[in-house]
Image: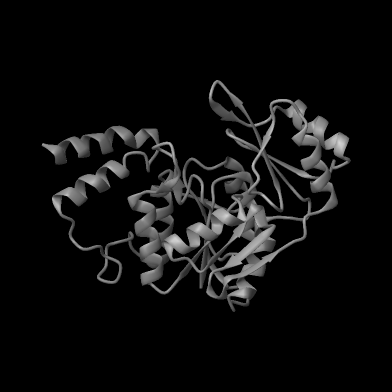
Amino acid sequence: PLCALDLDGVLELDQFGFPGLTPASALSIRALLAHGFRPVLATGRSLGEVKERCRAYGLAGGVAEYGAAVFVIQGELESATAPSAAMDRLRAELSVVDGVQLDGEYRFSVRAYTVQSGTRRGLSGEVARAALVRAGADDVQVIAGEAQTDFAAPEVDKASGLRTLARALGATGDDAYALAVGDSRPDIHLARVTLRAYAPRHADPRLQQAGFERMRTRYAAGLAEAVGRLIGHPPGRCPSCRMPAPTREQALLRAALAVGERGRAGIALRAAELLWRLG
């Protein structure tokens, strides 16, 4: 069975200025694999970024750019929708707007942003709407984020991408996906393709209204809680998925990497643990 995992805010955090796994999310992947599940990605990130992570994390494949592209690591299969004319026109319009920058890695959607005082920001609503009007692309989806604004074709969503991915991986039927974990509005569609849909505590409230069960903890800790619901125990608590006992240096490193995995509320606790281990 497949398990669809969102990337930003669920599997990865950028607590150190770059995206990466935390100990809880790495252990969640390990536990799923050890218990016979196949974790896959369901993200808005580019196809290239999905390929990179599938290879690094040992995943079977993933859905990129909100469902517009699919990647299967075995055989390097890549399946994607053709970029629409409306998206091409929108990309052209945004490329000439003063101060707007485009991420060239996005081939089937558009990721645009500005840089203000050295910090990436999403586009203002006015700039985004004006570009859509000029491009004649009123039906294009606008997905606003803190550091970018994404534009996706109207027919694209993560659920349709996951169905394509399941077929490519030989998983058919209503039970192809045993689990889905997401935290933002584009993840709402995941509930349509999975037996269990979970959201970390920090997630957009609209996910709970769409049928997601909200976890008690945030971010990667919420992911680990969801995985524990599936396998019957917290990740790492049985002989199949338990990690080897760490050395003192390894324990220190794990404690440092885990500082932000529960969000701000858990920083003090993790910092205290780190100080204790250093003592």
Locate residue 187 relative to residue 242 in the image: left or right: right
Locate residue 60 relative to residue 228 in the image: left or right: right
Residue 156 versus residue 139 in the image, above or below: below
Camera-side residue: 30 or 202? 30
Q: Position of residue 35 (x, y in %)?
A: 38, 72
Q: Position of residue 159 (x, y in %)?
A: 66, 60
Quarter in which the C terminus is drawn = top left
Q: Which residue is at the far top?
A: 117
Locate residue 58 relative to residue 40 in the image: left or right: left
Camera-side residue: 200 or 46? 46
Residue drawn where x is 63% and y is 45% of the image: 185
- Way the structure is coloured: one colour
Locate residue 89 relative to residue 246 in the image: left or right: right
Snapshot quadrant of residue 147:
top right
Query: How many discs appear?
Result: 0
Q: Which residue is at the far left?
A: 279
Residue drawn where x is 42% and y is 60% of the image: 227
Q: Position of residue 186 (x, y in %)?
A: 64, 48
Snapshot quadrant of residue 141:
top right
Residue drawn where x is 44% and y is 41% of the image: 18
Residue 255 versus residue 51 in the image, above or below: above
Residue 14 versus residue 127 in the image, above or below: below
Q: Position of residue 13 (x, y in %)?
A: 44, 43
Residue drawn where x is 57% and y is 30% of the image: 120
